[in-house]
């Protein structure tokens, strides 16, 4: 299928947080889009455990914006979103990295948008010396992310589903199954 890519989340300034594998779908000047298969292993360094992720996802790593977006997919439909406020992602020789800045925007199956981990952001801002500028950029990024989600702008507009390989898509009524 597509090229495998190693994905790594770091905590400020550059501490390993978690890592996993995906398959490169596309890259533009603004983002890298990755398909992560159900059953993948996520090695969580901070918690000292490896998780098996049950659902597939399309994950977008923005190269200029201060966030990432993971879109949970089941039976060809979007079921959830998990967005990290993070420094812009960086493509490296070995994969892709980003620095997670704690604040998250989440929409669970059947749920509503929720900002989580604000307490973690406050604690880590002090513990790891987030500058006033870094804190302000993280909060501004969260606002931009919320605005995109509420307005249904890319990637919150279902257009990412067209990038899914055929085996992940729901059949369209009237179209022949291959």
Image: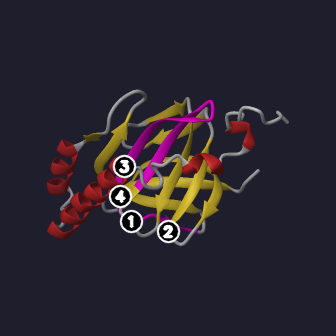
Residue ID for mark 4? 86
Among numbered discs 2 and 3, the one appearing first in the sequence: 2
Based on the displayed image, in which of its 4 quarters is residue 52 positioned? top right
Q: Percent x, y for residue 95?
A: 58, 61
Residue ID for mark 1? 65
- Residue nearest the viewer, comparing 85 with 163: 163
Residue ID for mark 3? 149
Q: Main secondary structure of the magenta part?
A: strand
Q: Is residue 157 magenta?
A: no
Among numbered discs 1 and 4, the one appearing first in the sequence: 1
Horizontally, residue 78 falls left or right of residue 15, namely right
**Callout 1–callout 2 Cβ contact below 8 Å:** yes
Q: Measure the alpha-carbon separation of dots 2 and 4.
A: 15 Å
**80 lies above or below 157:** above
Q: Percent x, y for residue 18?
A: 45, 46
Residue ID for mark 2? 30
**Callout 2–callout 3 Cβ contact below 8 Å:** no
**Callout 2–callout 4 Cβ contact below 8 Å:** no
Q: Percent x, y for residue 116?
A: 26, 40
């Amino acid at each position: 299928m597509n090229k495998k890519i190693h994905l790594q989340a770091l905590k400020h300034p550059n501490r390993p947080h978690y890592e996993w594998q995906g398959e490169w779908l596309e890259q533009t000047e603004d983002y890298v889009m990755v398909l992560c298969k159900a059953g993948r292993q996520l090695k969580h360094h901070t918690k000292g455990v490896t998780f098996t992720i049950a659902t597939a996802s399309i994950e977008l790593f923005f190269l200029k914006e201060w966030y990432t977006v993971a879109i949970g997919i089941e039976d060809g439909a979007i079921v959830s979103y998990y967005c990290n406020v993070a420094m812009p992602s960086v493509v490296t020789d070995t994969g892709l990295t980003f620095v997670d800045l704690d604040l998250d925007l989440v929409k669970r199956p059947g749920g509503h948008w929720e900002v989580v981990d604000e307490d973690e952001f406050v604690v880590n801002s002090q513990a790891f010396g987030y500058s006033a500028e870094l804190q302000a950029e993280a909060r501004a990024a969260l606002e931009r992310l919320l605005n995109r989600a509420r307005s249904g702008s890319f990637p919150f507009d279902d257009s990412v589903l067209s990038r899914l390989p055929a085996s992940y898509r729901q059949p369209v009524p009237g179209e022949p199954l291959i």
